[in-house]
Amino acid sequence: MAQTGPNLYLVGFTGTGKSTVGRSVSVQLGYQFFDSDHEIERLHGRTIAQIFTEEGEPAFRELERKYIEEQHPANGCVIACGGGLIVPDGMLELLHSRGVVLCLHATLETVIERTARSVHRPLVSGEDRETKVRDLYARREAIYRRAGTTILTDQRPIREITAHVLRVFQREAHDWTAKNS
Ligand code: S3P
């Protein structure tokens, strides 16, 4: 049965496991699951790569903002957020006003390995991928660090990561509800 309660926003760098973990957590919570990249592709009928090529990154960031502002349910869902979604000013605050924000983290070696065959990540594909990943992470590290409680996903079974996320979410959802009701 569908449950209600504050949303859970999973943020973090590309390749940290947000979609896999998010899906697994949503099943345990009885929440709906959404992946912001897939939702944006569905809503706009184009792939992320097409949006980047045809309209550029700022236009994609605006679609991400719109999705968070008005295109998903206000509660009862887990949302795996695209890696750059929290980068523009105000986005992190917006997420915190809508629910619990947890940040997934993996080493850059893991990220490089996990994103090797990806076709929907224009910022870290093509030539010299490894340098692109490292540069992008260096530019964003500070924002991920202040995003929310960080949960490591390196070399841990999905079941263990799911249990960890659920524990932290339950505690933070309680605090979030007390603060926002
Ligand atoms: C991006 C990460 C991608 C996707 C887009 C841009 C980023 O999502 O939103 O390619 O700026 O880091 P994932 O975090 O799911 O890879």
Image: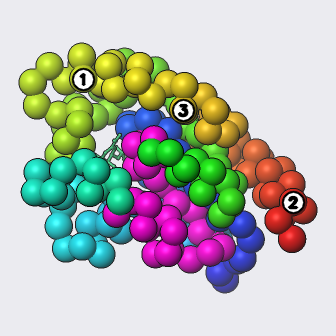
Q: Determine which residue is flagged by label 1.
A: 132
Vertical relation: 104 (above or below) 38: above
Q: Indicate which disc residue 81 carries.
A: none
Q: Position of residue 3 (x, y in %)?
A: 70, 77
Residue at 17% across, 45% down: 119
Q: From the viewer's side, name the closer residue of 70 and 20.
A: 70
**Ligand 1 within 8 Å, label 1 CB:** no
Measured in 3D between alpha carbons, the distance from the residue under mark 1 to the one under mark 2, in whole angstroms, is 39 Å
- 91 sits to left or right of 174: left
Can you tell me which quadrant of the image ligand 1 is in? Answer: top left
User: What segment carries the magenta color?
Assistant: 63-87
Measured in 3D between alpha carbons, the distance from the residue under mark 3 to the one under mark 1, in whole angstroms, is 18 Å
Q: Where is residue 4 in the image (x, y as percent from the top left)?
A: 72, 76
Q: Quadrant of the C terminus?
A: bottom right
- Return the disc, 3 or 2, that comes first in the chain's sequence: 3
- Return the disc, 1 or 2, that comes first in the chain's sequence: 1
Q: Indicate which disc residue 143 carries.
A: 3
Question: Disc 3, disc 1: CB below 8 Å?
Answer: no
Q: Where is residue 115 in the image (x, y as percent from the top left)?
A: 28, 34
Q: Determine which residue is flagged by label 2.
A: 179
Label 1 SS = helix
